[in-house]
Image (cartoon, helix red, strand yellow):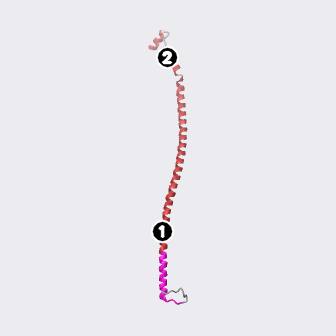
Amino acid sequence: MQDTTDDMEMPVTRRELREELAASEARVGARLDTLEARFDTLEARFDSLEGRLEQKLEQKLEQKLEQKLSVFRHDIVAELSAEFARHANAISEQLRTGMRMYDDQYKTLPARVERLEQRVFAPSASPKRARRSHG
């Protein structure tokens, strides 16, 4: 092919035009291949970065979730402990009230038993009574 840069007015043959077009097409094809290779490299790097970013986000989310769950667990345990304490106190008070009721029934028991023993085991004043109780 001739150097046509000096004279732009010089006619070009079809062969020269075809050769130049083929050479241009080859250069464009090579350039496209290079660009595609670079694109593939960038895409792979992007995918890698995206994967690492997703992994970091997952870790951060897991950490935040674990922190929130820990606080939630602590709050729930504190609330349940307070609730159980209230129930235990209520049950304890009911038991004390019930025990007082039974204790009140038996407060007078020693005096009643003593009077009963005096009547039953006291020496009889008259033998008639003794006979009545035996016969």
Indicate whether 107 appears above or below 45: above
Residue 89 pos. (x, y %): 54, 36
N-terminal label among 1 and 2: 1
Residue ID at (52%, 48%): 70
Tell me the crowding category of disc 2: few under 14, some 14 to 19, or many 20 or more residues within 10 angstroms, Cα based.
few
Residue placed furthest toward the left = 135
Residue type highlighted by circle 2: Glu
Q: Quadrant of residue 8?
A: bottom right
Residue identified by numbered label 2:
117
In the image, the segment drawn in magenta is: 10-32
Residue ID at (50%, 63%): 49
Q: Is residue 18 magenta?
A: yes
The quadrant of the picture occupied by the C terminus is top left
Residue 133 pos. (x, y %): 46, 14
Indicate whether 114 appears above or below 21: above
Count of marks, rendered view: 2
Indicate whether 11 appears above or below 79: below
Residue type highlighted by circle 1: Thr
- Which is nearer the eye, 23 or 78? 23
Indicate whether 30 appears above or below 120: below
How much space separates mark 1 and mark 2, taking CA atoms?
110 Å
- Which is nearer the eye, 31 or 124? 31
Q: What predominant SS class does the magenta segment belong to?
A: helix
Tell me the crowding category of disc 1: few under 14, some 14 to 19, or many 20 or more residues within 10 angstroms, Cα based.
few
Residue identified by numbered label 1:
41
Q: Nearer the viewer, mark 1 or mark 2?
A: 1
- Which is nearer the eye, 108 or 54? 54
Q: Which mark is residue 71?
A: none
